[in-house]
Image (spheres, grey):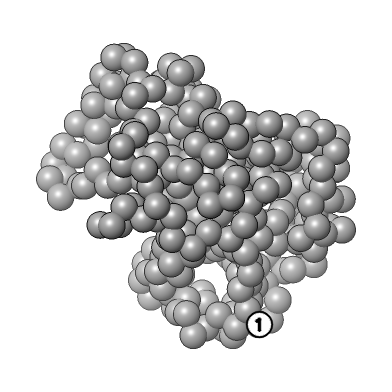
Amino acid sequence: MKGIRFLSDVKEPERIKVDNSRHVKEFMSKEDEIKRKKHWDERTKGNPNFFDGGLGNLMDSRGDRKYIASNFSIYETLALSAFGGKNPYSNGLTNVLRSSAVTCSLETRDHYVIVQKIPEGIVGGGLIDPTCGGMVPVNEESYINPKERMLSRLEREPHIKRENIVYLKYTGAHLAMDILTLTDTYAGKINKSMEEVLKDFKEDGSASITGIPIGELKSYILDHSVGNIEPKMVDDATATLLASLNTGDFNKTIKKMRKIGGIIEFGKYIDGEFIREENYFPVI
């Protein structure tokens, strides 16, 4: 576990306009660009349809938030190295790189929380992800819409349709320090059993999923984030599952994680800088 920074001043985003007059490339050194290009050339070799789509990059979390433009290749070059404990980029770029992402945690009608094991060969391969997660691209009008992106990915990956969701709430946002994302998180319940979810999922031959009994979720988070049980969770998964807990369990679990060495902070992201709040525990 690299670390999680929960933001204390965020509200649920709707459509967020990205400032295309600025781009994270202004923070890139020549060496950064060489590494990005080398990675992307290798990534797209034999994949001519691979598209380097636009992402938003958070610069300020206050109010309606401020994002500048970025690209998937910039994010992926770092993310694929991060889980090996490496960072190919300069401090100048690393300090401002906060790519737009969204995740959610869903509970089945028979009280299992759905988690995924990420397929090998992509960012976080072999590690645990929440029910759904992914990057939030910029649309043709230069907007990002985290909730809409999450709902569309749910239909495509674990095959959970909008009409299957009986309850959904926004649970906040965090900075994942392993792959440097700004991730909005949601939690909810669906009208399908875990058996039904598994049946629909297997029909597509996608990555493996499993259900965690809701009563075991707190220990599961501890074991697979700061504990010694494999596979480990990506920090986005840890944060998403934590945020799905009620306030009391959220605070208690974080205190236990900190005792074992987990790095979890609270604060605000202002003008490209994280401002830590020493004793902040949110009411969720």
Question: Looking at the image, is 188 positioned above or below residue 175?
Answer: below
Q: Which residue is mark 1?
A: 109
Position of the C terminus by quadrant: bottom right
Residue in the picture at 63% in, 31% down: 274
Q: Which image quadrant is residue 24 in?
A: top left
Q: Residue at x 24, y 26 (%)?
A: 37
Q: Is residue 199 visible?
A: no
Is the residue 27 above or below the residue 259 in the image? above
Instruction: Tell me where residue 123 appears, x and y as whole percent.
Output: 42, 42
Q: Nearer the viewer, residue 199 or 58?
A: 58
* Viewer-closest of 119 and 246: 246
**In terms of secondary structure, where does tag 1 sit?**
loop
Residue at image coords 50%, 55%: 102
Q: Is residue 85 visible?
A: yes
**Residue type for callout 1:** Arg
- In the picture provided, is 70 more to the left or to the right than 130? left
At x 43% / y 67%, what residue is drawn? 148
The percent coordinates of residue 184 (x first, y second) are 56, 54
